[in-house]
Each structure stands twice: as structure tokens, then as C-alpha cells.
Image (cartoon, rainbow, N blue to C red):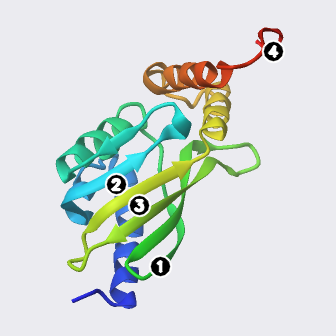
Amino acid sequence: MPLTRDQIEARAVALQVAFVEAARRNEWRWIADEFYAQDCEYVCEYAGTMLVRARSRDEIRATHYGRDMMVGWEGWSFPIERYTTHGNQIITHWWNRGPGTRADGSHYQTPGVSFITVNDDGLFTSQLDLFDLAHQMHLCDELDAAGLLSAKLKELWVVPTKQRLIEMLSRNLPAAAR
């Protein structure tokens, strides 16, 4: 039997709470077991520079909630600010929130959205994550200048991602523009 709107919203709220707890513990892998169907598909295209496609709960735990959110991301959080539902879909607006705050008290953060499909058993069967990678790179530069960017994150993710962005965006540019 299909879930009711209230049941879908309860899953969104539970995910919101789980993200707060995962950030507090700096442990994300358990979310895969709590929320994702065994055969769920997760996709994040990282602005065309890198495709992360996980085709099972185990792959989601290993990539998105493992490799992609653990090493170097200490002190980061990804709070879900708001969500909406439509049928069996949850659409979330969340933040890539870096450690610390700016002098004016604002967070170092960039927005993201997720499109999640929920099965009749309440488990997620698909998720597409989107965020502005160029702004994320700018945010990492700000954090680096403030002494808040992990050296490991810079080495393993920021520098390689910037290199892929530059390479991708440089294709087909006239020689004078390079």
C-alpha cells in the first residue's frame, strides 16, 4: 500500500534529524542502512567533473556516506533546511556547511538539493544530489584562507576537483582565451 503524505513527510523529518546526528558523531555510513533500500540508486554528477553512481545500499555506504563524507570532512555538516513532498518524492534543500563561522557570524556554506524517491516500505529507492560545484570550490578557498580547511580534504578532493573543472571548462576555448 502506498505511503500517505504524512508518512512520506515523517521520512523527511527522520532524515533531517539523522543528518544532525551524523554530523555530531562524524559518522554517516549508518544512514544508508536506516533509509535506503538494498537496490537503491544514488547519483551525484559533481558538475560534470566526476560521476558518483552507487547502485546498492552497500555502494551508497561505501561512496556517498563513506569515502565522500568521511575523510577530510570532519567539522562539516549538511543540515537539511527545508523539504517538500510530492507523491512518493522528497525534495530537500540542504547546506554544505564548513567548519567555523565568519567574523560576521554567518556560516561558511553553499546550498544543495536532493530528489529522493520513497518506496511503499519507507525506504529510498533513488536519490539525485545537485549543488553548485564552483561555489563549493570558492567556499573551500574561503575556509583555506581562514585556516579551517582540512589539509586532507584539500589534497584528496579540492585540488583534484578544481583540476577537473579547469580541464573540463578549458575544452574548446580559443587559444587566446586560455
Q: Which residue is found at the position 43% from the left and 22% from the top? A: 156
Q: Considering the numbered disc 4 on the image, is that residue within a helix, a strand or a loop?
A: helix
Q: Residue furthest right?
A: 176
Dot label at residue 20: 3
Q: Residues within 10 Å of mark 2 (few under 14, many from 20)?
A: some
Residue type at mark 3: give it: Val
Q: How many marks?
A: 4
Q: Are marks 4 and 1 in contact (CB under 8 Å)?
A: no
Quick one: label 4 or label 3, which is nearer the N terminus? 3
- Judge from the rendering whether residue 154 lies leftward or rightward of residue 22; answer left or right: right
Dot label at residue 45: none
Dot label at residue 22: 2
Residue type at mark 2: give it: Ala
Quick one: label 1 or label 2, which is nearer the N terminus? 2
In the picture, which quadrant includes the C terminus? top right
Tag 1 residue = 85
Quick one: label 3 or label 1, which is nearer the N terminus? 3
Q: Residue 127 appears at what percent x and percent y? A: 38, 58
